[in-house]
Structures are given as C-alpha cells and as structure tokens.
Image (spheres, rainbow, N blue to C red):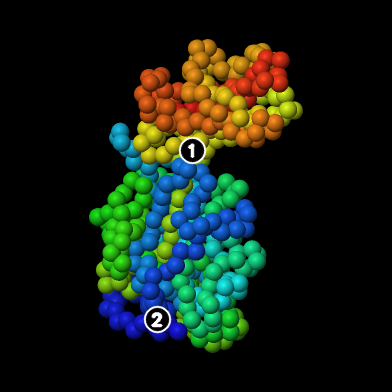
Amino acid sequence: MIAKLSLAFVVSSSLAAAQQLDYGSLHPVRGLPKHAGVYDVSTGKFRPVGAKSATASVQTIYNNTCSVTAMFSARVACEDLYDEGRLPEFVGTVGQTWYPDHRVEQFEVAYCTSAVTGTVDLDWEFYDTQSGLGAGGSCSFGTAGVPPVFTAGVFGFSSSALGFPLPGSTSQSTTACWILGFTTGTNVVCIDSSNSANDQFVFRVAQNNTQAQLGAGAAGPLVAGNPNASAPGGGTFHHPPGIDPVSGNPCGHGLDTQDLFWINTDGVAIGGVPPGNCPGGGTGPVSTGCYWFGGFPSNPFASFYLKIEGNGSCGEAGNYTAYCTAKVNSLGCTPTLGWSGLVSATGCVFFPTDFHADNLVGNKSGLWFYGTNGLTAVPFQGGHLCVKNPIKRLAVQNSGGQSTACNGSISMDFNAHICSGVDPSLVAGQLVGAQCWSRDPGSPSGTNLTAGVAFTIFP
C-alpha cells in the first residue's frame, strides 16, 4: 500500500486566486516504474521493451519525463485531468527551420494503479489546440465558467474499449507503476508545430477504476516536468536532455510545460456540484477548475509524464504523389510502393527515409532510379518509364524472398543518398521522380517496373 505524502507550501495570494492547490493527491512512487513495452493499437499486441514504431526514422519530438520516479497523482473515477505542452520547432544545422507539422508515430505515458492486470480502466486522449490552458500559467482557459472539455481529440485510446489490455498490479491495494508506449497504428496523426508559443497541445487522462477495484490503493498519472526557461524542451531531438533529480538519468522537461492542470469532474461546469455517485457524494476536496502542484522550484515537477515520437513532417513541401502505371509481373502481381520519412536537404543528419517497392518477384536483383528533369509516362520494356532522362541509378539489391512468389522488396534511403553529396542537384525545392526496376525472367522483357513516386525535397 502507498501512503500519502505530507507536503507544505507557501502560496502567494495572487497565484492562489487563479489556481487551487492540489498537493493532497500526490503519492510517492516506491521504486522505479517498470517499462511495459509498446502497445500496437493496430494489432492489439505488445512489442518488447524499448521497441518503437516499425518506422526506423522515429525521433523524440516532445519529452516531459523528469522526476518520473518521485510522485503520481491519485485520482478518483469522476475526474478527468487536462494538461498541456508545445511541440518544438525543428532546428537544423544550417540556420533555423521548423516543420509546420509533425507526423506522430508513438506516444508514451506513465501511470500507477492498484487495479489488477486485466481490469485497469484508463482513458487517454490528445488534442491539437492552440488555446492551451492559459499562457504563462494564468489558467485563463475556462474562467468564463466553461471547463476545457474537448470532444474530439486527434488520437486516443480507451482501455475498456480495447479489452483492458493495460498492465496493472498483481493484487488489489498494492500499487504498481508502469511506463507504456503505444503506436498510432494506421491512424494518421498530424500535429501542428511552430517557432512561436501559439501551437500548444492538450491531453486528457482519466482513470475509471472504482475504489472497490483499487482496494486500499490508488491510481493516476505520474507527475513530471521542470518549467526551467534556461533549457526549454530539454530531451527533444534538438535540445539536450536534462537530468532527473531523483534517478540522475537523462530526462526531458517538456517545452512550455507549466505548473498547472485542469480537473473536470464528470462534465460539470466551474462551481457546479459533482454527481452524487462520486466519492463523498460529490463533496470531495477537488472539483472542476484549475489546479497546481505547489510551484516550481519547491517541487521538481510541473506536469504529467508524456513523450511523443514523430517521423518528420506530414507533408507540406515534402508531399509524396504516386503517378504513372506499374507493370504486372509474370506471376500476375502488381508491384506496390510505400514510403515514410521526410526527404530533406539536411535531413540525413537527423533521420533516414524509407522508400520500398513491394510485391516483386522474390530473390531477384533490382534497383531504384530517379531523375530531376521532370516526370513522364512512356512505354518501356513492356511497362512504363516514369522518370525523364537523364536517369540516375542507385545500388543494385536483391529483392529477397522466393523466386516463385511475389514476396520480394527493394528499398532505398533517399536522405542517405542526398547526404553522400554525389548529386549536387538534390537541393531544397527540387522535384524528384523515382521508380524501381527489377528482374523478372518470366516476362518477355525479363524485367518489371513499379509506378513512380514524385516528391519535393524539404529544406
């Protein structure tokens, strides 16, 4: 069983007027939280500890993980918590540029619970909103009496809807703490970012287990963060990490993290009476409104644990377009194309791209080729040539798989090719057309061709 931590604070009258203290809900974490691995929302299965999205180019774009071993915020089932942050701009090696958006591949959250595994009932939702919870910790959002209740997040999960897959405790009244990653799966999650403080986000945490399910224990998110202006967003892919004051390990203190959060008690407005089915018949110490942890630096946390990992921009100048026509191979299969990552003139320093031609005849040689002189679609080797001359070829590869099946694949990392410097025409703003050629002995031409993919190189 985890006992409550007794804390004392000095509160300024001006700050207390805008925010309410909620230190009574803080519980100490006994020992280090365990890593549960990564829950894949597409398959409903967990990947091993340390796993990331299948896309190799995932980078940490938001990191609020400092002080994760210190405290968690024990909540009741009536309370939804809303917290905020801001995605940092991308800072390159030449000047400063920023992505107008980020394509998110994976979120990581952390919580403690005494509900047993198989019954953990936790909801989490992410909202891309520029309103935040109030600039500079003012808690101005919702002061008109309307709580910040959002109805349509860009991504979220409900453990009850997913069949209660989240790990919990081995027995009631014994609280276990977990760090959990989960992929966005087939959902396209695109989040705005900027070089200003306007592009904030909000996320919601709700633990729905009743006290009967928790026994003598508790449940809620881990608290984290360090609103230190000298190192904003530490631990993201362009700011160095901070150091956890408890464990001494590298950690992140998320950009724009503030010493505040909102509680909404089952949808009631500010000053409203919580429903009678809430603990204490709705007369508990907390209700809808803005709360704070007691103030940094007295407390080495200011937010709830959250890490976001992305894979470049959602598009903008880097949009991909499939064009031209693929050639059906001798086994009756049509090659397919896929891609991920942002092609960037400086991106090879930070992350790779993954172009792949699939559904090819297995165990055959092939290669990617490209051109920077425009796009076309003219008859060629029984199919279509989609790239205008002059054509530039990449290295020959083997497609893998079996020669009697369409299980071959040939890939390329175009950012690595840019970074090699062998082609000075590959600069920001350049339109590129690319296509994959491979051997197909059963075809009259002995070859096979994919469709083409066109893209513009991002700065």
Which is more N-terminal, label 1 or label 2?
2
Kind of residue sitting beneath label 1: Gly
Kind of element beneath mark 1? loop
**Residue at which label 2 appears:** 24
Kind of element beneath mark 2? helix
In the image, residue 203 above or below residue 432: below
Q: Name the residue at the right extreme.
A: 332
- Residue closest to the eye, 48 or 90: 48
- Residue closest to the eye, 275 or 215: 215
Kind of residue sitting beneath label 2: Gly
Which residue: 61% across, 30% down?
363
Q: Sort mark 2 into few (<14), some (14-19) or many (20+) by Cα contacts within 10 Å.
A: some
Side (left or right) of 182 relative to 426: right
Quadrant of the image occupied by residue 19:
bottom left
Please provide percent x and percent y for residue 264. Answer: 52, 71
Q: Is residue 145 visible?
A: no
Name the quarter where the C terminus is drawn.
Answer: top left
**Residue at which label 1 appears:** 341
Q: Sort mark 1 into few (<14), some (14-19) or many (20+) by Cα contacts within 10 Å.
A: many
Which residue: 29% across, 51% down?
240
Side (left or right) of 84 relative to 77: left
Determine contact: label 2, label 1, CB under 8 Å.
no
Which residue: 34% across, 67% down?
67
